[in-house]
Image (cartoon, helix red, strand yellow):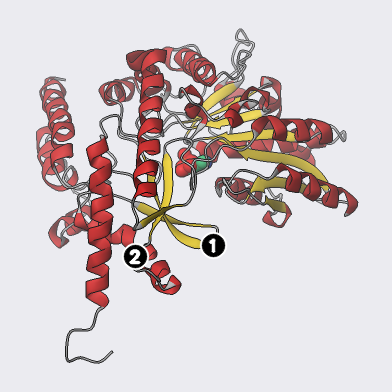
Amino acid sequence: MDDLRRAGRSAAGLAADHLAAVPGGPVWRAVPDADRAWLTEQQLPASGRPLADLLHEIRDHVLPYPMGNGHPRFFGWVNSPPSPAGVLVAPLAAAMNPSCAGGEHAGVLLERTAVRWLAELVGYPHPPGAGLLTSGASMATVIALATARQRVFRQQGLDVRESGLYGQRPLAIYLSAEGHSCLRKAAELLGLGSRHLRTVPVDDAFRMDTAALRRLITADKEAGVRPFFVAASAGTVNTGAVDPLEEVAEIAREHGLWFHIDGAYGAFGILADEADPGYAGLGLADSLVLDPHKWLGVPVDCGCVLFRDPAGARDTFSLVPPYLRDDGSDELGWFAEYGPEQTRPFRALRVWATIAHLGHEGVGRLVRRGTELARTLAAMVDAADDFELLAPAVTSVVAFRFRGRSAAPDPSRAEALNERIPAAVQHRGRAFLTGTRLAGTAALRACILHPDTTEADLAVLLHEIRLAAAEITASETPAPGTTS
Ligand SMILES: Cc1ncc(COP(=O)(O)O)c(C=O)c1O
């Protein structure tokens, strides 16, 4: 243990030094060949080496090449920096190393609190046992969709766990054109068939068009397909749009559909002062998915699925072999009865520590800051004659395009340029941006999740995009005297 104590102190120092150095370094950099070889080609060691040696190797070959999301000018995808409290407690969870499948121990009991706090933060009802932590929103979505599938067949007097889907009438699932691909994966995995996934068009602000949703449901009923599940988004990945949740809830109620909300990224946006009115109705969902490893900064991995009724998930997943049978003293049973994972990590310690450190107030501040900065960036884009804002900034994502200053820009050139800009910005190392496709065109998107991002960082981002565009253009311009 003395070795671990000594090396543990060094590891804590290394982690703190790393976090302190991140803002002063490049946001991202390519891994040079020598370190790439160390990372990918090591031989299986015949004998072990001391803990202290491992730390030196991590310092030299691992820590210098982060993904970039610890940096205040990382605006890519939906990846936050780690919360300091989460970093602090992660080794303690590893030191305890429980399986949170179930049983009477701190890991399981604290998960009850972590899940309840998450529900309370976003204002979702929480009967005891109605939720669990997962690896992320993708797994949370699988659990929600499987639970809905079990319910719809139970209504027909069938246990689909036992019968499978053979010979059943197709079930239609509704998702907006901007909904996340994890629902499609879940539908494919659960044998529901992506062919029966209906893409609901969106309005000008990239929100689900509820009139179109009604039309699709009617058409399915007429065609003998059973409408079954509607997934709304509270914060889409491309633009951060919030679907009109209350209206979707009403349509789901009218037609007896399971109402699901993907709030993986954006559910916490409800805490912003000027939260989008679309959030009204969030509490009406049958299932709600959140990702504490996104806006809250809980170190990866941590998703969460919440239910209005805990019994459905247990009916879908409970399978307790004799060697796991407990004394039945906890009427909620084991977490492993509510999802596919049996051995489950102690995620709750990272969630508990992150929220306990920030408090309700601190989480609100974090969300408000990201939302305000997104509105500032949107205003900067709008005011610049070489950029074009593509969607209103309602959460902390800004979707936009680089247009350049040409009076008559060539659309195919602009398209190619916007496709190439993200990688060029990343390689310059001063900011990190990713792209997407929006309404059929190449778009840039910046997602602001870092508590230390400033307005000056936003100006650097726009400047870097201009420089990257100039670099791309210069690299394409034939040198004088050459032919193309
Ligand atoms: C809106 C939304 N839903 C679902 C997901 C999938 O989440 P995870 O990567 O945690 O599985 C993401 C990831 O970015 C997302 O933004």
Q: Which mark is residue 475?
A: none
- Residue most extreme to the top: 329
Disc 1 target residue: 440
Above or below for 340 versus 128:
below
In the image, is the residue at mark 2 within 8 Å of ligand 1 by its beta carbon?
Answer: no
User: Real-space Cα distance between discs 1 and 2?
Assistant: 16 Å
Tell me the element at label 2.
helix
Name the image quarter holding the N terminus.
top left
Tell me the element at label 1.
loop
Name the image quarter holding the C terminus.
bottom left
Which class describes the residues within 10 Å of circle 1: few (<14), some (14-19), or many (20+)? few
Above or below for 369 versus 392:
above
Q: Which mark is residue 420?
A: 2
| Left or right of 476 on screen, residue 288 | right
* Kind of residue at disc 2: Arg
In the image, is the residue at mark 1 within 8 Å of ligand 1 by its beta carbon?
Answer: no
Above or below for 255 versus 446:
above
Location of residue 455 in the rendering, given as x and y in whole percent from the top left corner? 26, 36
Location of residue 112 in the rendering, given as x and y in whole percent from the top left corner? 51, 15
Location of residue 224 in the rendering, given as x and y in whole percent from the top left corner? 88, 51
Residue 455 seen anywhere in this rendered image of the structure: yes
Location of residue 57 in the rendering, given as x and y in whole percent from the top left corner? 12, 43
For marks 1 and 2, the one nearer the N-term is: 2
- Residue most extreme to the front: 407
Which quarter of the figure has residue 56? top left
| Left or right of 208 on screen, residue 365 | left
Which quarter of the figure has residue 465? bottom left
